[in-house]
Amino acid sequence: MPVLLRSEVKPSPVTLAWLKKTATALLRHAGRKQCELSILLVDDSRMAELNTTYRGISKPTNVLSFPMTDDPSSPAPQLLGDIVISLDTAAREALACGRTLEDYISVLLVHGLVHLLGYDHERGEDDAAEMTAREKELLQKLVNAKVLAPLSE
């Protein structure tokens, strides 16, 4: 299950080895250990460019997902897609909610992966509830595996 990592932020405030370990554990817990995932860490400027280009929203966001398949439920080994995380936004949001940057990036990674698995909170309340439930399930698995500190509601 290759996890491809790249950081456009130098020096990166998180180690790529930690991120790879976390992403690998997440894929395993999601039942996608044979899938390939690409993760890109960027600053707010780059994230705003991507958000403008792909969503028509001209400001940064914390995470974007770019699926590589129309059928994320396919059991065959595949490239799931790309997850892009803004380290600037993640740092601000982590501070605001009292989390470490690593723990907060884990939460964003889960959110991005769940999008790649076909969930979408923007399709309506039922889909949002399903997505939130899947996120909570995966986050709890990371907590149980001691990859992530326990989360408070």
Image (tube, grey):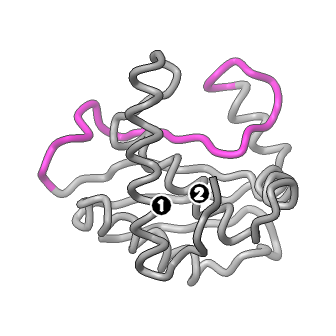
Distance in Å between CA atoms under marks 1 and 2: 7 Å
Q: Amino acid at mark 2?
A: Val
Q: Position of residue 9 (x, y in %)?
A: 79, 65
**Residue at x-position 51% and y-position 47%:** 112
Q: Position of residue 60 (x, y in %)?
A: 79, 37
Q: Which residues are magenta?
A: 53-76
Q: Nearer the viewer, mark 1 or mark 2?
A: 1
Q: Are marks 1 and 2 in contact (CB under 8 Å)?
A: yes
Q: As drawn, is 29 to the left or to the right of 71?
A: right
Asked which quadrant contains residue 123, the reply is top left
**Residue farthest to the left, as pictured:** 75
Asked whether 49 or 147 is in front, the reply is 147
Q: Earlier in the sequence, mark 1 or mark 2?
A: 2
Q: Position of residue 108 (x, y in %)?
A: 60, 53
Secondary structure mainly formed by the magenta segment: loop
Mark 2 — residue?
Answer: 107
Mark 1 — residue?
Answer: 139
Q: Amino acid at mark 1?
A: Leu
Asked whether 141 or 21 is in front, the reply is 141
**Residue at x-position 49% and y-position 74%:** 22
